[in-house]
């Protein structure tokens, strides 16, 4: 009897002493693994999408803009997503503005999309001929309605061509400011 009571006491003491050690081992190992996983994620891509489309709707339910890319890779440490072949379309009351490029960068905490390499913007008003802008780099600020670059730009509308270095376009006021080296050739239809 004495030995069975003694064995029970030893067993209870072992459980009481080993339980905290086991719990520490179990939880500290998983914390270390999750810390290692978090370190890997923060230094690389934490998510990606292929053939992705995002749409923004206004309070009236109408489509305001659409962004499509063949791929999107998000980098949490840089607070940005890299886009392959992004295409963005902004829908206005009487016009549609489309922009596309080979690469793009969408910034997490800013209302900013940077388009790079073979950037083309087409403005298609409902009642006029379209205007096309070509450049190598363009930053779009959607909420402000601003597009800007310091790179060379070429505007084409019908047979008219205007070139410049750097520009700012305000899509709300429809005012374009060409910064320097402005040259243009305008063709007027004879009626």
Image (tube, rainbow, N blue to C red):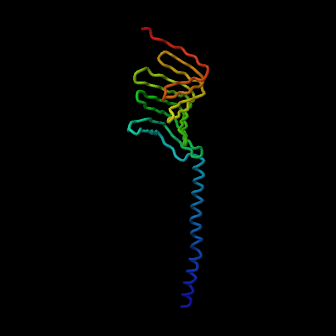
Q: Residue furthest front?
A: 173
Q: Is residue 134 above or below residue 6?
A: above
Please tell me in which quadrant of the rendered image residue 36 appears. Answer: bottom right
Please tell me in which quadrant of the rendered image residue 164 appears. Answer: top right
Give 131 or 24, whichever is nearer the viewer.
Answer: 131
Residue 116, percent from left and from top: 56, 31
Residue at image position (55%, 80%) is 12
Residue 132, percent from left and from top: 49, 23
Q: Is residue 46 above or below residue 164?
A: below
Give 58 or 8, whichever is nearer the viewer.
Answer: 58
Residue at image position (40%, 39%) is 59
Give 95 or 31, whichever is nearer the viewer.
Answer: 95
Residue 56 is left or right of residue 18, and the answer is left
Q: Is residue 63 above or below residue 131?
A: below
Residue at image position (43%, 30%) is 92
Q: Residue furthest bottom?
A: 1
Q: Is residue 40 above or below residue 60?
A: below
Residue at image position (47%, 17%) is 158
Please tell me in which quadrant of the rendered image residue 91 appears. Answer: top left
Give 19 or 140, whichever is nearer the viewer.
Answer: 140
Image quadrant occupied by the C terminus: top left
Q: Residue furthest left?
A: 61
Residue 139, percent from left and from top: 55, 32
């Amino acid at each position: 009897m004495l030995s069975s009571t003694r064995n029970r006491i030893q067993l209870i003491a072992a459980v009481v002493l080993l339980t905290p050690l086991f719990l520490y081992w179990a939880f500290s190992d998983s914390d270390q693994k999750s810390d290692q996983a978090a370190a890997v994620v923060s230094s690389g891509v934490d998510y990606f999408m292929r053939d992705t489309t995002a749409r923004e709707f206004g309070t009236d339910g109408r489509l305001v803009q659409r962004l499509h890319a063949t791929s999107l890779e998000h980098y949490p440490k840089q607070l940005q997503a890299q886009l392959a072949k992004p295409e963005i379309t902004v829908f206005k009351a009487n016009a549609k503005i489309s922009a596309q490029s080979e690469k793009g960068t969408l910034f997490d905490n800013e209302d900013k999309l940077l388009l790079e390499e073979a950037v083309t913007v087409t403005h298609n008003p409902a009642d006029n001929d379209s205007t096309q802008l070509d450049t190598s780099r363009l930053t779009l600020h959607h909420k402000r309605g601003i597009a800007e670059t310091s790179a060379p730009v070429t505007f084409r509308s019908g047979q008219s061509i205007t070139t410049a270095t750097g520009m700012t376009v305000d899509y709300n006021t429809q005012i374009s400011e060409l910064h320097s080296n402005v040259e243009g050739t305008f063709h007027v239809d004879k009626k």
